Image (spheres, rainbow, N blue to C red):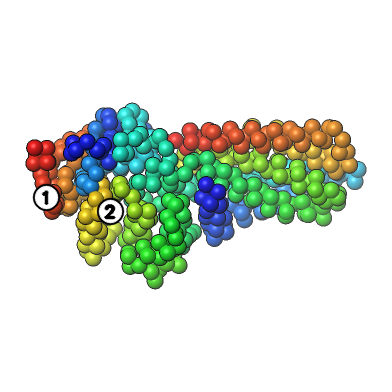
Amino acid sequence: MMGTNPAAVEAIGLSKTLGPRPALCDVTLELAEGETVALTGPNGAGKTTLLRCLASVLRPSAGEVRWFGRPARSDPALRRHVGLLAHESLLYPHLTLREDLRFAARMYGVRDAAASADRWLRTIGLESFADRLSSQISRGMRQRVALARALIHRPRIVLLDEPFSALDAEGAAWLAALLGDLRAEGRTVCFATHDPERARTLGDRVVQLRSGRLFEVRDGASPGRAPAAARAA
Amino acid sequence: MAAKLWWVIHKDLVSEWRGRQAWPAMLVLGIAVVLVFSFQMDLLPQQKPALVGGLLWLAVFFAGIFALDRSFAAEREAGCWDGLKLYPVSPSVIYLGKVIVNVATLSALECVLVPLFVALADVPLLERPGDLILIAALGNAGIAAVGTLLSALAAGVRRSGNLTVLLVLPLTIPVVLAAAEATRLMVAGDLGPAWWRWVQLLAAFAVVFTTAGTLLFELAVEE
């Protein structure tokens, strides 16, 4: 662990059973503040379940999640530090993109929610679609809006489930740049991906899940980060 | 907290207005029940006041179930439930927001059904509007408080079917009964201690169910 500050995110002995089989088995993981961690693994490995547990939208069957040293479920106000891009877009089918982002900003307590929503619509390049319903735009566009929704309150912990899915090459490049910006701002990022090359190049660390177990942890090749061995020395 | 409560209410009302998923079915069923009761039951004029309370509240209950059922089913279908759980607000804010929307929906339904009963069944339901509003407000609060909580529970454990009605009906029988009796006595012009006891019972149900719902909501929606 670096320094004496608590980790941004700690998963301590997390287990979760969904249906007949365990989705997570005794997963222990720490994400240091400012660190970008790539989460890899085959379909059904437990990536989405782990991210939902880390975001505290799913209660683990055993174990605990901590944010900055405090139990994630101890105070709803702590959730303002966390942004989640989920597997589903989390967008309301009968709200326009602008209304959806404004609702999220207001619920997160963002000052000047309307202006913030408009600013994010410009950032993701969908200003001209602002008054469309989420059901009237493409999946790639929905993914961008979902990203804006996850980041609109400038969370210190950013959890992204397959953020590159549905994005075209231009969108993927934009997202890679956005991840770089989040790293530069010192935010803690954990993203799930099926692409090992992307995991290696964008993550400071790569964590692999298999059948709900944390299988392997190794250094990524992202710029601006020393390898874990060097950091520990 | 009040601002966030308002935004939950606003979001739900806008979504339902645009989607119109629960309200049309609710209105059609409510009107159908009133029409059937009015035309099929060949009652003497003096018998109608004795039955109108029960018929009105049965119509409100069965039609209102559509709205209660949609409270959380819509959130689950769109995957938006996780989004709501991410916000830094107490789950009770979400619950109370949904309860208020459901109370408003039931009230709007009654605004259609009561005049229809008056017109078709020729019963003096609107002779004491203040008393009727009191009964309706308390009855709606009781039904909405239980219905919202159980709708959340049902939305988490099913993919289809009408589990909400099976869960809500037994728990709201006392509310529907109390509202029906209070309405019957009001129509008969008997606003004495018996009427007042039914109104107090309705108020007690509303307070107990809303408090219990607020406390139990987080457990009910836990995955």
Left or right: where A91 falls relative to B114? left
Front residue of B107/B214: it is: B214
Please state the horizontal and vertical placement of residue A219, each as a whole percent of the image: 12, 44
Q: Residue at x 19, y 41 (%)?
A: A207
Q: Tags 2 and 1 in contact by the CB under 8 Å rule?
A: no
The quadrant where residue A2 appears = top left
**Which chain is indicated by disc 1?**
A
Q: Residue at x 30, y 35 (%)?
A: A69
Please state the horizontal and vertical placement of residue A211, each as a whole percent of the image: 24, 35
Local SS, label 1:
loop
* Residue A68 seen in render: yes
In the figure, B108 relative to B214: above or below? below
Please state the horizontal and vertical placement of residue A140, each as a whole percent of the image: 32, 61
Q: Residue at x 24, y 50 (%)?
A: A186
Callout 1: 10 Å neighbours few (<14), some, many (20+)? some
Q: Amino acid at mark 2?
A: Pro
In the figure, B46 relative to B173: above or below? below
Query: Number of marks in the image?
Result: 2
Tag 2 residue: A163
First in sequence: mark 2 or mark 1? 2
Callout 2: 10 Å neighbours few (<14), some, many (20+)? many
Quadrant (top left/top right/bottom left/bottom right) for the C terminus of chain B: top left
Left or right: where B189 falls relative to A208? right
Please state the horizontal and vertical placement of residue B143, each as a whole percent of the image: 65, 40
Name of the residue lying farthest toward the bottom: A128
The quadrant where residue A101 appears = bottom left
In the figure, A80 relative to A72: above or below? below
Left or right: where B43 falls relative to B63? right
Q: Amino acid at mark 1?
A: Ala
Q: Nearer the viewer, mark 2 or mark 1?
A: 1
Tag 1 residue: A221
Local SS, label 2:
loop
